[in-house]
Image (cartoon, helix red, strand yellow):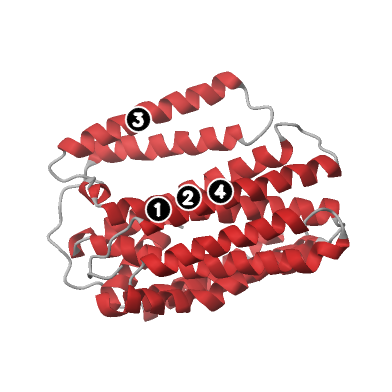
Amino acid sequence: GTLLSANSVALIVSAVGPGNRGRALGIQSAAQAVGLCVGPALGGLLLDTLGWRWVFWINVPISVVGWVAARWILPRTADLPDPKPLDVLGVACLVPGLALLFLALHGAGHVGTAPAILVGYSLGAAVLLFGLIRRELRAPSPLLDLALIRDRSFAAGSVAGLLSYVILFAAFLVLPFVLVRAYGDTSFSTGLQLAIIPTALALMAPVGGVLDDRFGARMPTVTGMLLVALGLGVLALALDGETGGRGMAMAGLGFMGAGQGLFIAPNNSSVMAVARPEEKGQAGGLINLMRSLGMSLGITLGSLLLTGGSRHVTVVELLRGSRWTWIILAGIALAAATLSGLRTSPRGKT
């Protein structure tokens, strides 16, 4: 999954050139959103009919079709830069360091994880990732070019992107519990309602890409995160356990998805614009890293806010925890909007 996600951005950016980068990444975001639309609804249908194992079996034929399409449709990469030696020490720090970091985040979000194990994961991740930074600052051919992070647009876009995925996946974790337990919805019905977010994302992602090509990344990314904050505020007011607020809650999900659609493609375009041609793969890999880290942080944050560290919560406690989740995520969206406003445009547009 990482190999696919990281290289897809680099492939698209290299294929279309800077003038159409935002539009192309907008189309990619829309395609990803279509998958997110189908996934929750199809997953809910499989759970209600065939059982949870089919959630995994269904991916086998999809993967085969994807392999065939990649083999015969994707062009071979040309004009590759001169190969550089692999930074083996960097890999030796990065891979286990990130693995321990994700294990620590996973353990923090689950009640019953032994404190000693959690501390061990955290310390191991800190030591290895600190070693990675020291190594990359000195390596003649670094695995991660930290000079990219010194660029304000790259740093602001990377952190804002991480925060956007924290919001998205915390919401995807919390919403099913609220809809199933507080409102009594089926898995299939819940999946259809969750599909509102990626549907709105798919509709607005190409718009965000066009706005980026025309005006630069700042305007669509700031506007997008403000829309996300608005949607989360609506959820905090509407999801109170009463059926009368369901329509307003669905509108809140639409605002969230539309905001993410405006944000993702221009943000990724702004990050990729900083990288030189030979750094496109590194930049795409860092975008993927921020996405994965944001997903893990979002799931951990959502689970902690929803349950407060308890194994069993009542419906009233569940609704209270979800309301605090929406409020805190709205604050994170405002922080991402602020970061997005700090970026500059390498093309002279803001």
Q: Which mark is residue 32?
A: none
C-alpha span from label 4 to label 1: 13 Å
N-terminal-most mark, 3 or 4: 3
Q: Which residue is mark 1?
A: 339
81 on left or right of 35: left
Q: Which residue is mark 4?
A: 331
At mark 4, the secondary structure is helix
Q: Position of residue 180 (x, y in %)?
A: 82, 55
- Residue 176 picture location, percent across and down: 74, 55
Can residue 111 be seen here? The reply is yes
Q: CA distance from mark 1 to mark 2?
A: 6 Å
**Mark sitting earlier along the chain (3/1):** 3
Query: What is the three-letter code of the residue carrying label 2?
Result: Ala
The residue sitting at 69% across, 60% down in the picture is 234
Q: Residues within 10 Å of mark 2 (few under 14, many from 20)?
A: some
Residue at left offset 27%, top offset 35%: 133
Badge 3 crowding class, 10 Å Cα cut-off, few under 14, some 14 to 19, many 20 or more, is many
Comparing marks 3 and 1, which lies closer to the viewer?
Answer: 1
Q: CA distance from mark 3 to mark 4?
A: 31 Å
Instruction: Say whether marks 4 and 2 touch (CB < 8 Å).
Output: yes
